[in-house]
Amino acid sequence: MFGVVHLPLMNIILVGYTPERTRRAIAFCELTFGKLPLRHRVLVLNRAEAPVPEEATGWEVVRGSNTLGEFSGWQEGLARLSDLGEQDAVVFVNDTVGAYQHMSVFRRWCLAREIRSMSANRMVGFTQDSTGLHGALTVRGLPAYPFVPTFCFALPYQVLVKLELRLWNGAEVESCVHGGTDKDRFFTEEVSPALREHLKWWLFEGWHRSEPLDAGSEERLRFKAHCIFAEFLLSAHCRRLGVELRDPLKHHPVARALEALNGVRYEMVQRLKFRPDQHGSTT
């Protein structure tokens, strides 16, 4: 006889900061995960003055501390899920989902399908590889790549137990960042030289919210650096524990091909949308 397949019971923790992005992220969760067997939906508002969205009906709302952005929010959301058991899995969502990477129907389908059939030893999320980067890319002696960007990912209860129900460790994150206004000393020796060089470029020049490092920007950039290392270290610790990083697109070739075509179309539309007109303005 065939054994009984037990689908994971899903719990969603969404961290919101701005009202507009939070509303969009709620809509994303309903559209993508609404047909999954959901137990809990927790919305952590990380901005003290942020109103509770009307769309949050059915969500438990928590006021987050914003100690470490989305990571502290997810941890505070986890604290509300005291009844998690072996059949549970948690989907972690940041309100940036879809903001910087188009979450097409193909991506959403793959993501929901992989989460629905998630095994006990996987981290499900879209992975990022070190394409084009050279040299050892390590954090605290652990490989930094590939990693799962944490705008949306899922972990089963068994992996959360391996992580001791902690998504980040404050001392580890702090050990990677000196801070200060000297960009050559901003990161510590816990970060490999090649990765330090890449992150100096990305944080101070290449990121959409980059700015020169000075006394006025140091606190914000140091905060962002802490979040970056929390993200790297979460994936690194999962790999160290033998957990598979499962990229939904890589396991569904037809959807991957359709997504590639869709990506070309989306990029063309975006370029046309923001094409300068004859007066040099944008449409």
Image: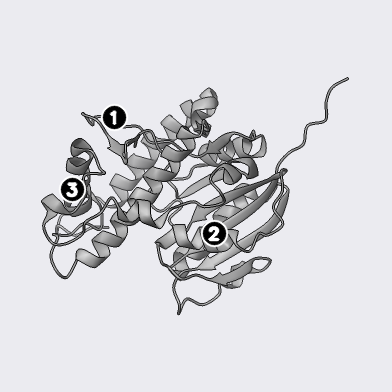
> As drawn, is 80 to the left or to the right of 100?
right
Q: How would you rate the neighbour count of disc 1 (Cα within 10 Å): few for under 14, some for 14-19, many for 20 or more?
A: few
Inspect the image, locate mark 1, and give the three-letter code of the amino acid beneath it.
Thr
Task: Tell me: residue 53, above or below residue 73.
Answer: below
- Report the mark closest to the observer, 3 or 1: 3
**Residue beneath disc 2:** 14
User: How would you rate the neighbour count of disc 3 (Cα within 10 Å): few for under 14, some for 14-19, many for 20 or more?
Assistant: some
Cα distance in 3D space between marks 3 and 2: 29 Å
- Could you tell me the amino acid type at mark 3? Lys
Q: Position of residue 83 (x, y in %)?
A: 72, 57
Looking at the image, residue 240 lies above or below residue 200: above
The amino acid type found where label 2 is placed reads Leu
Judging by the rendered image, the residue that carries numbered circle 1 is 131
| Residue at mark 3 to residue at mark 1: CA–CA distance | 17 Å
Task: Count the numbered circles shown.
Answer: 3
As helix, strand or loop, the secondary structure at mark 1 comes to: loop
Residue 24 in view here:
no
Q: Quadrant of residue 183?
A: bottom left
Sequence order check, earlier mark of 2 and 1 = 2
Please identify the residue farthest to the top as the structure is shown.
1
- Pick the residue in front: 265 or 56: 56
Q: Is residue 124 visible?
A: yes
Q: Which residue is mark 3?
A: 200
Nearer to me, 126 or 119: 119
Q: Nearer the viewer, mark 3 or mark 2?
A: 3
